[in-house]
Amino acid sequence: MTALKKPRSIIQPVSFCAGCGHAIIQRLIAECIEELGLQDQIIACCDIACSEWSLDALDYDFIAGPHGRIAAVATGIKKVRPDKIVYAHAGDGSSYVIGLTETCYAAIRDVPITMIVVNNACLGMTGGQMNLATTLLGDKTSSSPYGRSKDSTGHPVDMLKLIQNLDVQFAARGALFDPRHIEETKRYIKKGFENQVSKKGFSVIEVLSPCPTNWNLSPVDAMKKIREENTKVFPLGIYVDREERGTGCG
Amino acid sequence: MAKSNANTELCKGCRLCIQVCPKQAIIPLEDLNKAGYKIIAINTAACIGCGMCYRMCPDYVFSIEQETKSYG
């Protein structure tokens, strides 16, 4: 008897780097979908970037949209196929920088899709350049070799605080630095899918995820950095839950 | 009792499992798998099958299986 096993929807070995959080998120998505019995109704959207590696690994119908426009692509799919369950798996560069407009307008329209944004504090696939929205002050990246400075590039932005002001169904931030927070993140993602099943509004789940390759840290030290540094700037918890009529960390 | 099983051919040597195991039952090895990554081994006697390694592993190396005991 198997108590815990990799979801059946994952049909290929992981293509991400060692210690990458994208793979954990991919497993959480597949587990939530299987637990809710939605495998046959899924249309998955992934953006151009590291999230695209799940395109072949997951046994769902997939669309990779133009870079940064994944919220708009998912909106379009949901409008023409409202019976399907549509989720978007995207990075922070595409959702918060290149495609900020698309993300905000999907939230403003309150389209009933589930959006999972992976906040790894850099532009991962292109070589770890600084991300204007999520790289912490002082962090060294390939495009900020002396550390990000407030004078030249400004502060990182807590985008969930921005989305919190819009009329959305659910917004929450999880992290992957220990099993407890991974399970909490899974609850948020599951809630996002449940909202869509019951035809409620826009759900966005941001996940603080490590990028050991581009942070030049070991996977263990990258997790430690998230716990000790990134969570201070990007507090975890539920920001909006329209059902509860409560706002958390705001 | 449930025990963890590891398919170390999938392992990428990130060592995340070692620090989350509450029983220190995962042993880092210097041996390499076919892909060239350092692997781990599970001390089955110490494993309690809690599933922390399964939850943490980004490469789906672990599965938790219920041990079936045969009596007589």
Image (cartoon, coloured by chain):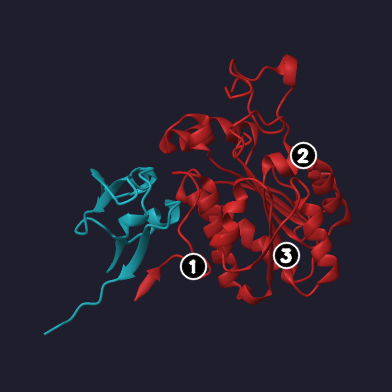
Chain colours: A red, B cyan
Q: What chain does badge 3 belong to? A: A
Q: Residue at x 19, y 58 (%)?
A: B45
Which tag, 1 or 3, sits closer to the chain's start? 1
Label 3 near label 1: C-beta < 8 Å?
no
Q: Residue at x 74, y 46 (%)?
A: A67
- Residue A63 image position (x, y, % from top left): 70, 61
Residue located beneath label 1 in the image: A7
Which tag, 2 or 1, sits closer to the chain's start? 1
Where, by quadrant of the figure, is residue A46 drawn? bottom right
Q: Quadrant of the N terminus of chain A?
A: bottom left
Left or right of A212? Residue A139 is right
Residue located beneath label 3 in the image: A86
Report the amino acid beneath label 1.
Answer: Pro
Residue located beneath label 2 in the image: A98
Of residues A114 and A80, the one drawn nearer to the viewer in this rendering: A80
Asked if marks 2 and 1 fall on the same chain, the answer is yes
Q: What chain does badge 2 belong to? A: A
- Residue B12 image position (x, y, % from top left): 38, 47
Left or right of A197? Residue A54 is left
Compared with A146, A189 (above or below) is below
| Distance in Å between CA atoms under marks 2 and 3 | 21 Å
Q: What chain does badge 1 belong to? A: A
Left or right of A23? Residue A206 is right
Report the amino acid beneath label 3.
Answer: Val
Q: Nearer the viewer, mark 2 or mark 1?
A: 2
Q: Secondary structure at mark 2?
A: helix
Considering every residue shown, the one lying at the far left of the view is: B72
| Distance in Å between CA atoms under marks 1 and 3 | 19 Å
Q: Secondary structure at mark 1?
A: loop
Q: Nearer the viewer, mark 2 or mark 3?
A: 2
Compared with A158, B47 (above or below) is below
